[in-house]
Image (tube, rainbow, N blue to C red):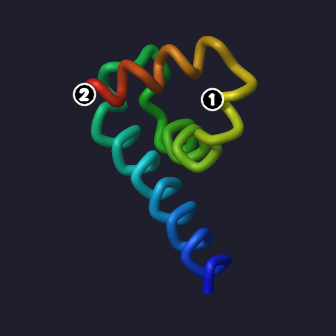
Amino acid sequence: MFLKLLGLSLMAIYLWGIWKFQKGYKKTNFSSSLTNRFALSLLWPALIFTNKSYRKNFQKALKG
């Protein structure tokens, strides 16, 4: 039961991050190509921890 709830919570956070990033994408410095936008949206959890530039742009998108 606990693992199921944890999994659902993590999935909700992941989807929320994708949604917020997509809504504020125009405020970032990234190119507006569809493939770039799609890849950056799907990889946001890994990129936040490994890439300082992405982290700053993600914060800009969240303020969007």
Q: Residue at x 44, y 14 (%)?
A: 29
Q: Residue at x 53, y 73 (%)?
A: 8
| Residue density around tag 1, few if under 14, some if 14–19, many if 20 or more, within 10 Å | some
* Viewer-nearest residue: 61 or 38: 61
What secondary structure is marked by label 1?
Answer: helix
Q: Residue at x 47, y 18 (%)?
A: 57
* Viewer-nearest residue: 57 or 37: 57
Q: Residue at x 64, y 44 (%)?
A: 43
Q: Residue furthest front?
A: 2
Q: State which quarter of the image contains the N terminus.
A: bottom right
What secondary structure is marked by label 2?
Answer: loop
Sequence order check, earlier mark of 2 and 1: 1
Left or right: 59 with respect to 9?
left
Q: State which quarter of the image contains the C terminus.
A: top left
Residue 14 in the image, given as x and y percentages of width and height: 52, 54
Q: Residue furthest bottom?
A: 1
In the displayed structure, would residue 64 be above or below residue 60?
A: below
Residue 50 in the image, given as x and y percentages of width and height: 75, 24
Instruction: Kindly identify which residue carries mark 1.
Output: 48
- Residue 36: which numbered mark, if any? none
Q: From mark 2 to mark 1, how far is it between C-alphas?
A: 17 Å
Marks 2 and 1 in Cβ contact (< 8 Å): no
Instruction: Kindly identify which residue carries mark 2.
Output: 64
Q: Amino acid at mark 1?
A: Ile
Q: Amino acid at mark 2?
A: Gly
Residue 52 in the image, given as x and y percentages of width and height: 65, 13
Q: Residue furthest right?
A: 50
| Residue density around tag 2, few if under 14, some if 14–19, many if 20 or more, within 10 Å | some
